[in-house]
Image (tube, rainbow, N blue to C red):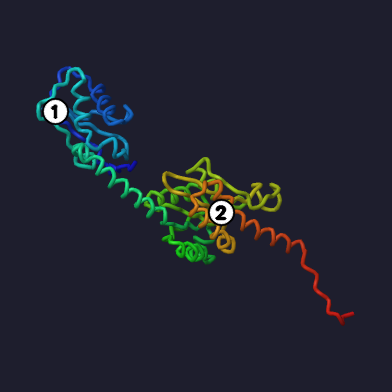
């Protein structure tokens, strides 16, 4: 069901009401019940002359809980002891709460249009992608960030709109704050690049776990803590959710980012779970690591000897 963002227009007021020893929390509770809201998010904030002002302290509310519900709200309030409503009593609001007064006969038509609009908006948002580059070396301009171009090359061809979401230092709070901000700005997917390693400077997975404690991860490689600069046992990619948005953490090397894109796009198209997305992304990167490890160990294919070579 579509949700209405109240945009700080959270007040509604009742005109044509007289109170006599009425208990205001009971009045607020009756209004909350009529709007299918928890009792602790509706308050009476002002009473004067024939007005009672309610404040709803949630940022969003279901359209179905509002549309055409004026008569229900008036009836609920009138049932509170000490409340008398005039014949022309009515509910008003400066914001979207005004849909309370929509005719009930038009409710289904309005809801149907809202559902279609909501579905179209969600589809649009889901295809807006912001890429966050992490690392002091990127932030300081020491290295060129080529990951945005790689992601854009793949995802634009699949119908996504890809933009640079900014550069974040190797800091959990900074990465988490930027990712949350972008998701709140209407991007359905935030991709981070870098900071997923096993060194003490790698904080991206932990940053995204601040936003989604159940962040799904997939291991690319394992290390023994204390070996070299490794303070963590694993290099991991990740996938999680924050609000209605999706978070995906990729490594820093562009070769790995490039290899992961086809699998990421396919997983998104198939609307797979975060755990499945993380595994899908990790698979081609693991393959690259396996080849690299094989070459480092010197397991090269023997050179074929020429028939006449001694």
Is residue 198 visible in the rendered image? The answer is no
Residue sitting at the far bottom? 308
Q: Is residue 16 left or right of residue 221?
A: left
**Depth check: 7 or 283 in front?**
283
25 shown above or below 264: above
Q: Earlier in the sequence, mark 1 or mark 2?
A: 1
Disc 1 designates what residue?
48
- Residue 123: x and y in percent read 39, 53
Disc 2 designates what residue?
195
- Residue 277: x and y in percent read 54, 50
- Residue 232: x and y in percent read 64, 47
Residue at 38% of width from left, 49% of height from top? 184
Q: Which mark is residue 194?
A: none
Is residue 304 visible in the rendered image? The answer is yes
Residue at 24% of width from left, 44% of height from top? 109
User: Is label 1 in a helix, a strand or a loop?
Assistant: strand
- Residue 198: x and y in percent read 63, 51
């Amino acid at each position: 069901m579509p949700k209405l963002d109240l945009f700080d227009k959270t007040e509604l007021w009742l005109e044509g009401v007289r109170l006599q020893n009425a208990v205001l929390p009971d009045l607020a509770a009756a209004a909350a019940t009529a709007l299918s809201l928890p009792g602790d998010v509706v308050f009476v904030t002002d009473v004067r002359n024939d007005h009672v002002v309610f404040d709803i302290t949630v940022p969003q509310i279901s359209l179905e809980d509002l549309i055409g519900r004026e008569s229900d709200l008036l009836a609920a309030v009138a049932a509170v002891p000490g409340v008398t409503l005039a014949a022309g009593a009515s509910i008003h609001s400066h914001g979207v709460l005004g849909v309370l007064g929509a005719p009930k006969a038009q409710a289904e038509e309005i809801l149907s249009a809202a559902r279609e609009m909501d579905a179209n908006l969600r589809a649009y948002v889901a295809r807006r992608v912001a890429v966050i580059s992490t690392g002091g070396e990127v932030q300081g301009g020491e290295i060129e960030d080529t990951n945005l171009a790689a992601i854009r090359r793949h995802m634009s061809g699949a119908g996504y709109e890809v933009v640079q979401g900014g550069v974040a230092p190797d800091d959990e709070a900074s990465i988490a704050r930027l990712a949350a901000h972008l998701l709140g700005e209407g991007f359905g997917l935030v991709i981070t690049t870098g900071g997923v390693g096993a060194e003490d400077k790698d904080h991206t997975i932990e940053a995204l776990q601040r936003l989604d404690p159940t962040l799904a991860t997939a291991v690319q490689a394992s290390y023994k803590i204390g070996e070299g600069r490794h303070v963590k046992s694993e290099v991991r990619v990740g996938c999680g959710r924050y609000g209605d948005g999706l978070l995906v953490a990729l490594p820093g090397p562009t070769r790995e980012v490039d290899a992961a894109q086809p699998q990421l796009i396919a997983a998104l198209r198939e609307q797979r779970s975060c755990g499945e997305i993380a595994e899908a992304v990790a698979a081609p990167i693991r393959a690259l690591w396996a080849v690299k490890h094989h070459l480092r160990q010197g397991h090269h294919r023997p050179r074929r000897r020429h028939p006449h070579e001694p």
